[in-house]
Amino acid sequence: MAPPLAAPPLTEKQERLLEQLRQAKTELTGQQIHAQLRQSSLPMGLATVYRHLRQLQQRGLLRCRHLPSGEALYAPTERDEHHLTCVDCGRTISLESCPMHDVHLHGDQLQGFALLFHTLEFFGICATCRTAQANAQAATPAAAAQQDIDNH
Ligand SMILES: [Zn+2]
Ligand SMILES: [Zn+2]
């Protein structure tokens, strides 16, 4: 994908961060990237890592999503991957394919934009948490009392 603007070339550190995220099979947090770089020939401070991640994001090369815990996960934008996240336990799984694959913006909708990437996230309550919630509800005194009333 050609850059849409005559942006300045990436710095060595930005190249390294991007390369690291491209080689990773999964999304990474800033902390994980920082920890991996500590062993490399180009270590960076955590603040530097976050600054460059933000700059790469502004250039449309990285995207970032936040888990219910507040943790931010980074991935290269060319990886068209979407997730389903449980708001209760925070479990997050990736979808097999992009549901937006055949969705396109046309003419007027684009309003002159050159598109770089899209994001899409689903949130819900996972099967494990739903079972746990159902069991907890059945075990509360209020539910038991209600059942008692229903039985009379
Ligand atoms: Zn859950
Ligand atoms: Zn997609």
Image (spheres, grey):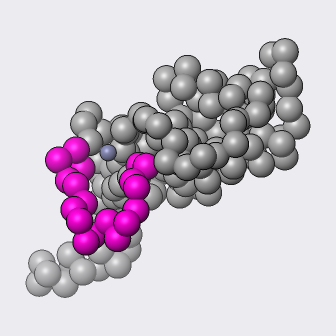
Residue 150 highlighted magenta (yes or no): no
Could you tell me which quadrant the N terminus lies in?
top left
Q: Residue furthest front?
A: 6
Q: Residue at x 47, y 37 (%)?
A: 2
In the image, 31 versus 42, the foreground residue is 42
Q: Is residue 144 visible?
A: no
Q: Quadrant of residue 12?
A: top right
Q: Quadrant of residue 124?
A: bottom left
The image shows residue 11 at horizontal and vertical percentages of: 76, 34
Residue 100 highlighted magenta (yes or no): yes
In the image, 61 versus 50, the foreground residue is 61
* Position above or below: 143 against 16: below
Q: Is residue 27 visible?
A: yes
Could you tell me which quadrant the C terminus lies in?
bottom left
* Position above or below: 95 against 109: above
The image shows residue 32 at horizontal and vertical percentages of: 70, 32
Q: Residue at x 34, y 70 (%)?
A: 111
* Position above or below: 38 against 74: above
Q: Residue at x 24, y 80 (%)?
A: 146
Per the rendered image, the range of residues in magenta is 99-117
Side (left or right) of 52 relative to 137: right
Most frequent secondary structure within the magenta stretch:
loop
Side (left or right) of 55 relative to 26: right
Number of marks in the image?
Answer: 0
* Position above or below: 42 against 61: above
Q: Residue at x 35, y 78 (%)?
A: 142
